[in-house]
DNA sequence: TGTACATCAGTGAACGCGCGTTCACTGATGTAC
DNA sequence: TGTACATCAGTGAACGCGCGTTCACTGATGTAC
């Protein structure tokens, strides 16, 4: 075998799929150290390529970071979809609606716990313009991004008659806030040590609160 | 006048109170750019002093950052105390308890909006060990830090008979999560543009949800 | 009250580091004739 | 089917930058005699 391991040596001059390799290196960096760890030079190093080779595929370091952010958001959507798919069939519309909101929240929290670096990257302040990322898709396999999945679930509450339509506007913001706050405090903040071990339990209590309070 | 303005020229060899000057420069940097902006060199520049002079007063850049973080937390506590002090006297214990929880939450949100950089610094992940900051006091003028103020308020809910004692343990985590999440999403995240203008209104709705859901 | 001296706050210069980015280039690929 | 050539992915070297930190130093202060 001529191709060996750690810094993946090539035997061809061309890389093959450097764009994907850089993106995957960027994801690995974000996974380890959050958004601040996504460095162009380090990504090229991991891809076994000269630093400036990156500029064939990304306009700048910011551009790579945007791509990593978008892929992280896709992964959040995927985690939500997985929870939604686990809802047992045959529920009443009201129960299904409630279960959907819980599933979206649970997926969010599970992702935050499983992939804290990607989670922080997905929702980090973008130092420059926060784009609605027109070129970088943020949706999961089902074609909807995390925010859309949440809105769909909250919409079901109204459709099922659990939530008065008058309270609907902005309700998703309240639910998102609760779950996001817990995730941030535990994954990336001062509650890591005390609450970390009981993260899932607190998550469920938090979702109870949201359900009752919405 | 020999002492002029912007980079504050001294006419004495000694600075006078460099420690405080560096801390204030650090606060100014955090105010502008959050925790990542707290740089030793930049702080000394603002204080009109050689870069290494900082090491007479802070062991390292991390040490300065800890000090800035602690002072930011004190400021959060102060904002909460201000809201608590505005509670009208003569309320029933139940109403006072509810008003206290709201006041703590409102103070938190107001601070996040008024001082986003300091807010982010106060609750940022500390890259190295998260200390309970034994040497850096995080309390407000009243002597209690933000977390303690929140716990006090939630305790009142139990004392006033609004919250069953069985639900008390960890309840402050749920309340904190909700408020923290909204603050982060709006101040430092993707909801800045859409929700920013209605921040206070959403804050009150969120506190309604917490009150009902707890 | 005046002088000698220890203390220690701030200086000046330098270090090594890793970053993002630009330049002119080289060499493999795939297409046109 | 074979050759000439345009394309463009990746190279090698270098840039300027700002950072945190260390070194041996200088000079004002305040205390001891």
Image (tube, coloured by chain):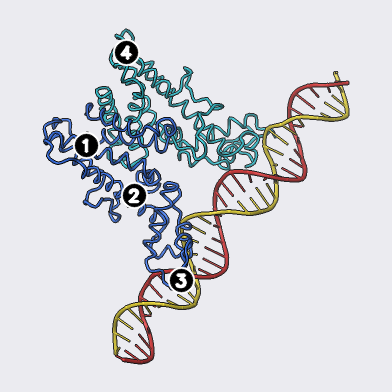
Chain colours: A cyan, B blue, C red, D yellow
B99 versus D32 height, above or below: above
Helix, strand or loop under label 2: helix
Are the two marked residues, 4 and 2, in contact with CB atoms closer than 8 angstroms? no
Q: Position of residue B39 (x, y in %)?
A: 46, 54
Q: Mark 4 points at which residue?
A: A96
Real-space Cα distance between discs 1 and 2? 21 Å
Residue drawn where x is 43% and y is 30% of the image: B194
User: Which numbered mark, 1 or 3, is in the foreground of this view?
Assistant: 3
Q: Nearer the viewer, residue D13 or A146?
A: A146
Q: Where is residue B180 in the image (x, y as percent from the top left)?
A: 32, 36
Q: Could you tell which of marks 3 and 2 lies nearer the N-terminus? A: 3
Real-space Cα distance between discs 4 and 2? 44 Å
Helix, strand or loop under label 4: helix
Q: Name the residue under label 1.
A: B101
Q: In which quarter of the image is residue A155?
A: top left
Task: Name the chain letter of the residue that bears numbered label 2.
Answer: B
A54 versus B30 height, above or below: above
Task: Name the chain letter of the residue that bears numbered label 4.
Answer: A
Real-space Cα distance between discs 4 and 1? 33 Å
Q: Could you tell which of marks 1 and 2 lies nearer the N-terminus? A: 2
Image quadrant containing the C terminus of chain B:
top left
């Amino acid at each position: 075998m001529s191709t060996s391991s750690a810094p993946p040596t090539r035997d061809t001059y061309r890389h093959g799929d450097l764009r994907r390799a850089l993106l995957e290196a960027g994801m690995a960096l974000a996974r380890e150290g959050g958004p601040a760890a996504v460095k162009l030079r380090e990504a090229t190093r991991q891809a076994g390529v000269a630093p400036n080779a990156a500029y064939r595929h990304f306009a700048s370091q910011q551009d790579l970071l945007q791509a990593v952010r978008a892929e992280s958001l896709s992964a959040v959507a995927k985690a939500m979809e997985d929870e939604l798919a686990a809802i047992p069939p045959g529920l009443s519309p009201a129960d299904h609606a409630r279960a959907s909101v819980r599933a979206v929240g649970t997926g969010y929290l599970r992702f935050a716990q499983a992939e804290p670096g990607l989670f922080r990257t997905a929702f980090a302040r973008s130092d420059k313009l926060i784009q609605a990322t027109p070129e970088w898709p943020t949706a999961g396999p089902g074609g909807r991004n995390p925010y859309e999945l949440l809105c769909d679930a909250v919409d079901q509450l109204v459709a099922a008659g659990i939530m008065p339509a008058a309270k609907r506007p902005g309700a998703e913001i309240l639910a998102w806030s609760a779950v996001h706050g817990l995730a941030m405090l535990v994954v990336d903040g001062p509650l890591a040590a005390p609450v970390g071990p009981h993260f899932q339990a607190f998550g469920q209590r938090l979702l109870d609160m949201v359900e009752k309070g919405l």
